[in-house]
Amino acid sequence: MDVEEKRRRRRVLQALTGLLLGMFVSMLASTVVSTSLPVIVHDLGGDQAAFTWVVTATLLTTAISTPIWGKLADLFNRKLLIQLAIVIFVLATAAAGFSQDPGTLIAFRAVQGIGAGGLAALSQVIMADIISPRERGRYMGLFGAVMAVATVGGPLLGGFITDTIDWRWNFFIALPFAVAALVIMQRTLHLPRRPRTKARIDYVGIVLLSTAVSLLLVWVTNAGHDYEWWSLETVLMVGGALLAAVVFVIVELRSKEPLVPLTLFRNRTFTLAVIASISIGIAMFGTSVFLSQYMQLARGATPTEAGLMTIPMIGGLLLASVVIGGLVTRHGHWKPYLVVGGVLLIAGSFLLSTIHYDTNFALVSLYMFLLGAGVGMTMQNLVLIVQNTADPSEIGVASSGVTFFRSLGGTIGVSVMGATLATSAADLFLDRKDAIGTALMKLGQEGAAIGEQLQSGTIPQVSALPESIRVIVEDIYATAIAHSFLIAVPLAVISLVAIIFLPNTPLTRMTTSERVQAIEADLATVSTPEGMAALEATGSVAVPDAAAEASGHARRRRRG
């Protein structure tokens, strides 16, 4: 390795420091409450619908705000934007710690999602600015370490705080890390200067997109509980969502600066990656949320124990993402790994739909590991291949577009799975009312109090229930949660089909900044090394290779 290459890698690592810490703050603030949510919702007097909305509110605003942040990234200073996203995210998270009822908690979680959308979109865009798609795997070890500490340590720390101090402290734990991330990012993250452009924000598109998604999720969450699936409310909400979606498409086609440029769908890679991402979002968000409920409601685990019990899924995700990232960088091949990941998603989702309250935990761990490995192989690589073929001027909206549809899939998935779980659990409690009544009568006055709690719909604290009633409740929730996991299976199949048809485009070694410079120098017509004097190369490959790649990108744009 020559001196210039070492210097370049050092600059990349310095720039990544603040970005990695920012991602750590986001992940820690999200995962630290994951195992505590059943206890939090129980203490605030919330039911299964409230539990679902505590999760869905964050995912909803994350999904809606992601393309907005992506569009802003193409117009404004990306460093300033990601710092703003961190501030919004952490302040909303801290405010959620003062919640006194489920409604307040849901509201602050919704604001938290706005910041999370910025972190999700901008981190991908900034990485494309400083690291080429082909080299991304070389740095996956760093991302893997951050993910490991946040995704494994977060639930464990959250469970410990909930069991020993108070669950409210889970919401404050990320504050000192956020301050450190802002300071380090200010000192180390130096992005290439970008040309000034006149900002045009598609406010109408933002309102229409928010309306369409919100109406759909409110309908899915409440249908079958507050009103029938086939009812006037269904007609109004679904009809309103479809109308808003149609008008959104019309507005985007006519807008000079659309929120989601529909021309992106002319790119086959982008379209198929979006289809695959929707299914992956459901598998990633839906199953991980309800696995925590399974551990506490179906196996009687405490929050700390639930954090330990979900490690196999996180382990599969981390191992797959780090190992596959390294293999992609070394060999340049990505499609075989995506196909295997799609198969593992199907296998993991289906196997988790077969679990019971007394299923051997070694088998449950294997199922979780398979699902986690499937997500690890597919999630980041789908963004990677989209960035590899997207026009540099649209890298923000292209990256955030894939992330948006993944978040949207996760949001809809959590809503549908939560509604299925609530309906299934209510039906199973009704079917087992005789057995429950007999068990409660034997407990006397204590049984009457437990019966009132179960009838209220509030999520019970299963680990505190007497043995005779606990086994019945665990069996009911295990069956209901398994039914909800089954929803992810057909969508995982669709994801695999989309992955199979993805064009197998080789990964470029040029960063987004270098591709912009190449275009500005009009290198599409350059075929000799002498012409490269117009470009200050910063990549790790020989200059003529960069010229050939730039020329190839230009030809593909003219054809597309």
Image: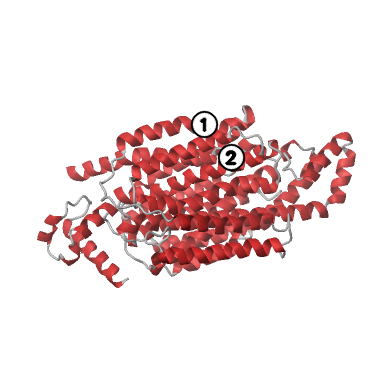
Q: Residue at x 87, y 46 (%)?
A: 437
Camera-side mark, 1 or 2: 1
* Above or below 9: residue 274: below
Residue furthest top in the image: 165
Q: Position of residue 101 (x, y in %)?
A: 67, 37
Residue beneath disc 1 = 173
Which amino acid is tagged 2?
Gly
- The answer to whether residue 118 is left or right of residue 31 is left
- Would residue 527 be found to the left or right of residue 449 on screen? left
Question: Would residue 62 be found to the left or right of residue 357 on screen?
Answer: left
Disc 2, SS = helix
- What element does badge 1 sit on? loop
Residue at 56% over, 54% down: 411
Q: Mark 2 — residue? A: 307
Of the numbered discs 1 and 2, the one sitting upstream in the chain is: 1
Residue at 27% from the left image edge and 56% from the top image edge = 509
Residue 362 is at least partly visible in this image: no
Rendered image quadrant of residue 18: top left
Q: Which mark is residue 465?
A: none
**Which quadrant does the C terminus fall into?**
bottom left
Question: In the rendered image of this protein, does residue 204 appear above or below residue 156?
Answer: below
Pick whichever, 318 or 157, lies toward us. 157
Q: Please provide percent x and percent y for residue 239.
A: 62, 65
Q: Amino acid at mark 1?
A: Ile
Residue that lies at the very extreme toward the left in this rendered image = 530
